[in-house]
């Protein structure tokens, strides 16, 4: 029986193309992330979540739900291991994460472009102290999302570490399971950040409420899918971590009688070559 032919070594041009693709994907992601903060917070963008309504309510609702559905399907399907195995037949493994990041960004850009403001007021905070607290919670959410990625490995999460190693001809090592910083308090601090970013607002409109409810439902479903994958990948380590650490609210479901805990290790420096792991990253699903 003939053995399969060995894979050819990628040329310098191929490695450079993958690196360029990863850099462009990351640049698009970062611009999208910044725009998203302005879109949700109604700051400094030409069209925000609460721009003046232009369509009938039910038309706007249907369009917005469809746009949120497109993002949810893309974000979840591409994160599943079976899809990744299928994609590896057509795309270099090193570029898979960058492609995921790019398509997620494009799904969000489509949402920003086609979003239909809906009008309607659910609540309006008037007390200056309360308004300040809500603005602070909003800012804290976005900051927590960003900081959390650096506490693990920002470069791996968004595909840069993979394409850089591919460009250099260095084998990629999967990230080890660790629980740095806020991961010792909750299993999914990244998602806690998103909840704060979406729900802390002094002005809650109908459009904002639809967005917050839909994204919150998606996050709760994604957590279940993601944790199933994490158990399959990390086994007993993640099972022990899940038993001893609450999902989203510090101290909410901590079991005092559980003696076993996942081994933790905090790596003081993050760079392209330092293996770290986000135990809840929707990338390793997770990833969000």
Image (cartoon, helix red, strand yellow):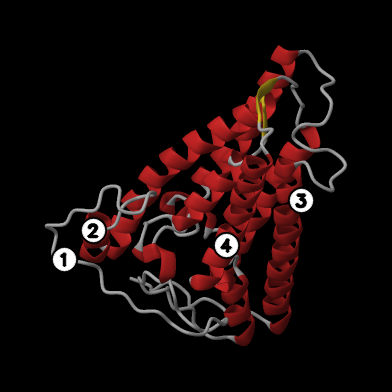
How crowded pointer 4 is (Cα within 10 Å; few <14, some 14-19, many 20+) is rated as many
Q: Which mark is residue 35?
A: 3
Where residue 138 appears, as percent x and y from the top left, is 63, 48
Q: Which mark is residue 97?
A: 4
How crowded pointer 2 is (Cα within 10 Å; few <14, some 14-19, many 20+) is rated as many
Mark 1 or mark 3: name the one nearer the start of the chain. 3
Do labels 2 and 1 touch, CB within 8 Å?
A: yes
Where residue 173 appears, as percent x and y from the top left, is 44, 78
Q: Which residue is drawn at 35% across and 70% down?
A: 177
Q: Which residue is drawn at 61% across and 47% down?
A: 133
Label 3 to label 2, Cα distance in Å? 37 Å
Label 1 to label 3, Cα distance in Å? 42 Å
Q: Where does label 2 land, which residue? A: 244
Mark 4 or mark 2: name the one nearer the start of the chain. 4
Q: What element carries label 4?
A: helix
> Marks 3 and 2: which is nearer the front?
2
> Marks 3 and 4: which is nearer the front?
3
Q: What element carries label 3?
A: helix
Label 3 to label 4, Cα distance in Å? 21 Å
Q: Where does label 1 land, which residue? A: 260
Label 4 to label 1, Cα distance in Å? 33 Å
Nearer to us in this view, 128 or 167:
128
Do labels 4 and 1 touch, CB within 8 Å?
A: no
Above or below 84: residue 111: above
State left or right for residue 96 relative to residue 185. Answer: right
């Amino acid at each position: 029986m003939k053995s399969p032919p060995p894979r050819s070594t990628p040329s310098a041009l191929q490695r450079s193309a993958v690196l360029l693709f990863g850099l462009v994907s990351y640049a698009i992601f970062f611009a999208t992330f910044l725009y998203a903060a302005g879109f949700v917070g109604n700051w400094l963008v030409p069209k925000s979540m609460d721009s003046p309504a232009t369509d009938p309510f039910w038309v706007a609702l249907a369009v917005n739900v469809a746009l949120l559905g497109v993002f949810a399907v893309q974000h979840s399907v591409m994160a599943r291991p079976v899809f990744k195995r299928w994609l590896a037949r057509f795309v270099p493994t090193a570029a898979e994460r960058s492609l995921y990041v790019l398509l997620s960004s494009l799904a969000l850009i489509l949402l920003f472009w086609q979003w239909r403001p809906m009008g309607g007021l659910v609540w309006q905070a008037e007390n200056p102290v309360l308004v300040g607290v809500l603005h602070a919670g909003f800012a804290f959410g976005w900051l927590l999302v960003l900081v959390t990625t650096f506490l693990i490995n920002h470069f791996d999460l968004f595909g840069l570490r993979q394409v850089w190693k591919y460009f250099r001809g260095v084998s990629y090592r999967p990230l080890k399971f660790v629980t740095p910083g806020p991961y010792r308090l909750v299993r999914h601090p990244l998602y806690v950040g998103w909840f704060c970013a979406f729900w802390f607002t002094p002005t809650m409109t109908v459009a904002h409420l639809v967005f917050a409810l839909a994204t919150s439902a998606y996050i709760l479903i994604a957590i279940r899918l993601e944790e199933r994958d994490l158990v399959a990948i990390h086994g007993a380590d993640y099972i022990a971590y899940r038993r001893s650490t609450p999902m989203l609210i510090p101290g909410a479901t901590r079991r005092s009688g559980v003696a076993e805990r996942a081994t933790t290790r905090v790596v003081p420096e993050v760079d392209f070559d330092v293996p770290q792991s986000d135990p809840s990253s929707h990338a390793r699903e997770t990833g969000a």
